[in-house]
């Protein structure tokens, strides 16, 4: 399971160091793609295959399903580590997530998220204010803390 929050920098060539414990869980190759809320989602291959199977089950007759699948898969790229434990993120993904210098790397259960530091701080501040409301809504999904 991925968990925790780390701050790292992305270099001019688009390379970023991922925390060692995340690298171990991601394996030798993994998938990075556009995520929600203007961040990147990074999946180990086994989790990516689960996501792929779930998305394949969506009806192509529904425009929202087609749009989400296009968004998710068109941005996906298989990644590998360099000798220094860095990953080179493609320009289209860096542009989407506005990754230019300071980044936040989050462990979120089955995936890693990579955020622009300023966007993460804004998102976190807004979410922190409504955390209790969000928790109450999760009760509707049969979730208890």
Image (cartoon, rainbow, N blue to C red):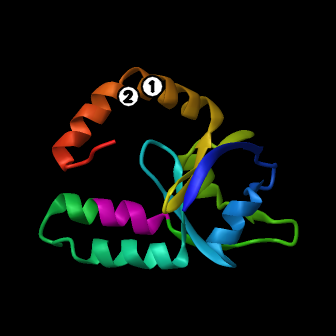
List the residue tagged with mark 1. Answer: 128
Q: Is residue 71 magenta?
A: yes
Q: Is residue 106 visible?
A: no
Say which element carries label 1.
helix
Q: Considering only vertical position in the picture, is 90 above or below 57?
A: above
Q: Residue at x 76, y 61 (%)?
A: 20
Q: Nearer the viewer, residue 79 or 26?
A: 26
Q: Residue at x 52, y 60 (%)?
A: 111
Q: Nearer the viewer, residue 43 or 135?
A: 135
Q: Considering only vertical position in the picture, is 50 above or below 100?
A: below
> Outermost residue toward the left?
61
Q: Is residue 104 magenta?
A: no
Magenta segment range? 68-75
Q: Which of the 4 image quarters holds residue 103?
A: top right
**Badge 1: few (under 14), some or many (20 or more) residues near its Cα, within 10 Å?**
few
> Outermost residue toward the right?
84
| Residue 131 disc label | 2
The spot of residue 25 in percent (x, y) is 63, 70
Q: Residue at x 43, y 79 (%)?
A: 49
Magenta-colored segment: predominant secondary structure = helix
Q: Marks 2/1: CA distance?
A: 5 Å
The spot of residue 44 in percent (x, y) is 56, 72
| Residue 14 disc label | none
Q: Is residue 74 visible?
A: yes
Q: Which of the 4 image quarters holds residue 7?
A: top right
**On the picture, is 89 further left or further right than 11?**
left
The spot of residue 108 in percent (x, y) is 51, 52
């Amino acid at each position: 399971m991925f968990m925790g929050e780390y701050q790292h920098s992305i270099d001019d060539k688009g390379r970023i160091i991922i925390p060692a414990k995340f690298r171990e869980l991601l394996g030798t190759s993994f998938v990075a793609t556009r995520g929600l809320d203007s961040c990147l989602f990074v999946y180990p291959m086994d989790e990516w295959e689960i996501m792929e199977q779930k998305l394949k089950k969506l009806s192509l007759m529904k425009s929202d399903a087609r749009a989400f699948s296009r968004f998710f898969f068109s941005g996906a790229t298989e990644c590998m580590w360099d000798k220094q434990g860095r990953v080179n993120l493609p320009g289209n993904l860096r542009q989407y997530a506005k990754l230019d210098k300071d980044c936040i790397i989050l462990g979120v259960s089955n995936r890693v998220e990579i955020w622009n530091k300023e966007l993460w701080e804004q998102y976190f501040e807004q979410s922190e204010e409504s955390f209790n409301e969000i928790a109450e809504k999760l009760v509707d999904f049969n979730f208890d803390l």
